[in-house]
Amino acid sequence: MRVLLIAGGWSDEREVSLSGARGIENALFALGHEVILFDPTDRLTELPDAARNVDFAFLNLHGAPGEDGLVQALLDRVGCPYQGAAPAGSFLALHKAAAKALFVDAGLRTPAWEFLTAPPPEGWEPSIGYPLYVKPNLGGSSVGMGRADDRAQLDAVLALAFRHGHEVLVEEALAGEEVTVAVLGGEALPPILIRPKRGEFFDYASKYEQGGAEEICPAPISRELTEETAVMAKAAHEVLGLQGYSRSDFMVKDGVPYLLEVNTLPGMTPTSLLPQSAAAAGLDFPALVARLIELGLRDHGHSDSHNP
C-alpha cells in the first residue's frame, strides 16, 4: 500500500510526534509499504490532494492538529482511511473537561475538577482541596502541567498552564499509583504500572527521557484491579465513541481506580506505553502497526486486500 505518514504539526508535542514517526516509518517499510511523509505544519492545504493519492493515512500527531479531529475530518471528506478515532471522538477525548463530564454521566470514577476558561481573579480559591494538578485543558504529554500543594504555589502553576492554552483544568491530586490500560480492537491489553523517577508525577521528562520512569508491564496489581481497569478503559473508549485503539490513564488510590483521561493517538516512540503493552500481548512493533492499519481499514469500510 501507499501510506501517508502524517506527523509533526504545530503543537507543543511536535518533537514527540516526529520522534515516533521515525519508528513507524521503519515498521511500514518492514511490512512492505511505500511511505510518503507529510508534515501539516506548512502544508495543511495540500492534505486533501495528498490523501487522494494514497491507500491509507497513518496518523502520529499529538495535540492539535490531530488529536482534535481536524486532520481526521479532512481525511473523511476525501475518503482516505486512517487508524483510530473519528473527528468527534478525537475532540471529546482531547477536551479533558468534556471527557470527564461524559465519564461522570456514565458512572466512571474520575478525580474532582474545575474548568477555567480564563485566568481567575486575584485571590481565587478552588472548590476542591489541595494538593491540585493544573493542566492545559486541550494539551497532552503533561506539557504545561504543574502541581500546587497550597495557595502559594497555585498562581505559578495556573500561569504556566495558561501559557499553553486558553482553557485550564484544575484537578484533585490523588495519592496513589498510576496505571495505564490500552484498548486495541475492542480488547484491553495488559496494564502498565508507572513509577516516575524524576518527579512527583508522570511529567514530560518522565514520559520521554530514557529512564525517566519505571514502567512495569504487565503491572504487578491484583487480578481484580486488572479486570476493573480493563472494564473502565473499554467503557471510556465506548463512551467517547472511539474506534480502533485508545489508552486510558488511571490513578489508583487505596486500591480504587480513578480515570484521568483517554488518549486517542497514544505515543509511538521507543519508550512509549502502547508498544510496551502490545509487546506483552505478543505484538512486536511492526505487528502493532499492521494491526492498527487493519483496524483502520475495517472501520472505514475498506478491505485489507491492499496489504502486501
Image (cartoon, rainbow, N blue to C red):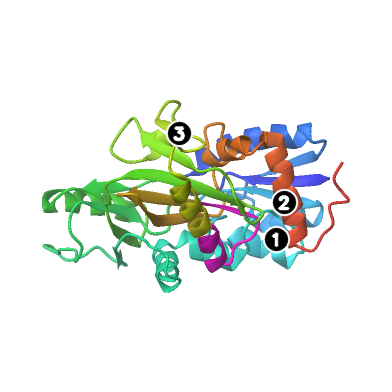
Q: Quadrant of residue 82?
A: bottom right
Residue 147, percent from left and from top: 25, 47
Q: Is residue 51 left or right of residue 126?
A: right
Give SS at disc 2: strand
Residue 160, percent from left and from top: 28, 49
Residue 75 got which mark? 1
Give SS at disc 1: helix
Position of the C terminus by quadrant: top right
Residue 118 in the image: above or below residue 192: below
| Residue 47 seen by the camera | yes
Which span is picked out in magenta?
Answer: 234-247
Residue farthest along the top direction in this orientation: 211
Measured Cα–Cα span from mark 2 to mark 3: 30 Å
Q: What residue lies at 77% left-to-right and 58% top-to-bottom?
A: 298
Magenta stretch holds residue 72: no
Kind of residue at badge 2: Ala
Residue 57 got which mark? 2
Give SS at disc 3: strand
Q: Quadrant of residue 119?
A: bottom left
| Residue 63 seen by the camera | no
Magenta stretch holds residue 242: yes
